[in-house]
Amino acid sequence: MNFEKLAEDLGLEREEYLELIELFIETGMSDLDILQSAIKEVNAEKAANAAHSLKGAAGSIGLMELSETAKEIEEKARNDRLEETAEAAQALKKKLGVIAELLRW
Amino acid sequence: LSSIFTPFQQADGSTTRRYGGIGLGLSICKKISNLMHGDVWAESEVNKGSIFHFTAWLGKAEDKKANRFEPVSLSGKKALIVDDNQSNLDILTHVLELVGMRVVALTNGEAVVPTLQKALEDENPFDLLITDIQMPGMDGHGVAKQIRDPKYQFPNIPLLALSSLMEQDAKKCEEAGFDGFLGKPIRREKLYTMLERIMGEMEDEGEKGEVVREKIITQYSVREEMKCSVRILLAEDNPVNQKLAKMMLTKAGYQVELANNGQEAVEKYTTSPENFDLIFMDVQMPVMDGMEATKAIREKGFDTIPIVALTAHAMNGDKEISLKAGMNDYITKPIKRELVFEILEKWVFNRETS
């Protein structure tokens, strides 16, 4: 993951971008917790909203792959296919963890 | 403990210590603090924590509030305009009269001082002088020098230069005593902004009873200044998007106020509408979404403030829905910097007032 490039695309300094991505991991993790509990409770709307929030935040800081996955989850949740989303949610959580790990270095 | 402020000293001097560094940071802090007639010291308890203190003598900052642009009304103001080209005079007269100004036109520089004096004697003085730079006989610089000559009674009249020459002339105009400089061809909106700005400045000085000629205003500085005085209300619920948009906008010189949802946006805007020049409105928000918030603002009679939708899906008719709800424009997320600035350009700077 090239933070310099991502920062540059947004017209930000590297440090500013890192601040954003830290905030993203924090809020993203909490969105994912909400998403996972919503999947367990079979609350499609709650799940869709959490995925929507993730999609938007990831997209705006240039993490397009994450954003796409979140988008798929949102769409499935809105189309009565919530049961198909658990795996993707887990995968997202893993990816976020990897980014958090990258930041520590 | 105080040894840690000595260069190349570490609290733990062993080569296996946990924390790296060569021990210069704190000694630099001490130096800086000492240079500011203060000092640095620390209190520390092993395995508990440390408190670092510093003192310094600082000058009080000049009270410079967020320079909100406060235009004066142009209507009723009396302007003297000078240009050797009659059709330029006709156009300028028309443009100034459109905003209710009274205009007297002259075709040569020599007539300026007598005209100003006559008006002063008749107790109907001019509020402003706009002059072309390149003229046969007495040119614009000559006019300015004469006006600013202390032997006449109008050293404070706002003076604006119009020239087809380029910006590098601004310096020369400043030296000659001009307050503002505009290149030709003139855009109406820019001219008005500059006039409001120049005359506003002069009025302030009048109140304080002191004459401080500020830096000359050029199209560029007017623009930059307008930017800093542009306040944006950003309604967006996602913290990451909030932070990103705020970073982008403040870096570019704009002022940003946040609202976490539609309801907050409605409250913030309607309690002080004069504080905002544009609203960026996320469409999907908790509590109250962007559509509802826009409708609420429009229903309260605020129909001129530009509201720009931030929408996640351009595909499924969000554009039409947001325009229908009373928004002026829309941006698709993820937002692109260039597009945001383009929108601001379009809705804040280039709005025609007529």
Image (cartoon, helix red, strand yellow):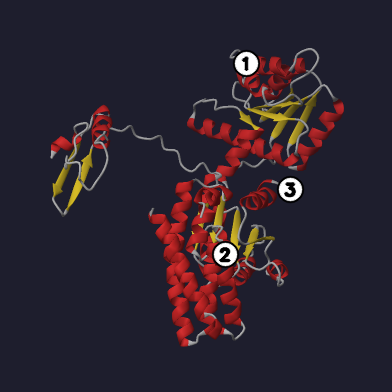
Q: Quadrant of residue B47?
A: bottom left
Q: Which mark is residue B128?
A: none
Viewer can see residue B287: no
Task: Please name the residue that numbered disc 1 is placed on.
Answer: B152
Q: Which mark is residue A65?
A: 2
Decide: is A71 above or below B81: below
Decide: is A84 above or below B278: below
Spatial CA distance of label 2 from label 3 is 42 Å
Describe the element under mark 3 as helix, strand or loop. Answer: loop
Task: Please name the residue that numbered disc 3 is placed on.
Answer: B352
Count neighbours of disc 3 (C-alpha within 10 A) and say few if under 14, some if 14 to 19, many if 20 or more. few
The x, y position of residue B163, in whole percent, is 74, 25
Q: Residue at x 59, y 63 (%)?
A: B281
Q: Residue furthest right?
A: B87
Labels 2, 1: front one: 2
Describe the element under mark 1 as helix, strand or loop. Answer: loop
Spatial CA distance of label 2 from label 1 is 72 Å
Say whether residue B41 is left or right of residue B348. Answer: left
Amino acid type at mark 3: Glu
Count neighbours of disc 1 (C-alpha within 10 A) and say few if under 14, some if 14 to 19, many if 20 or more. few
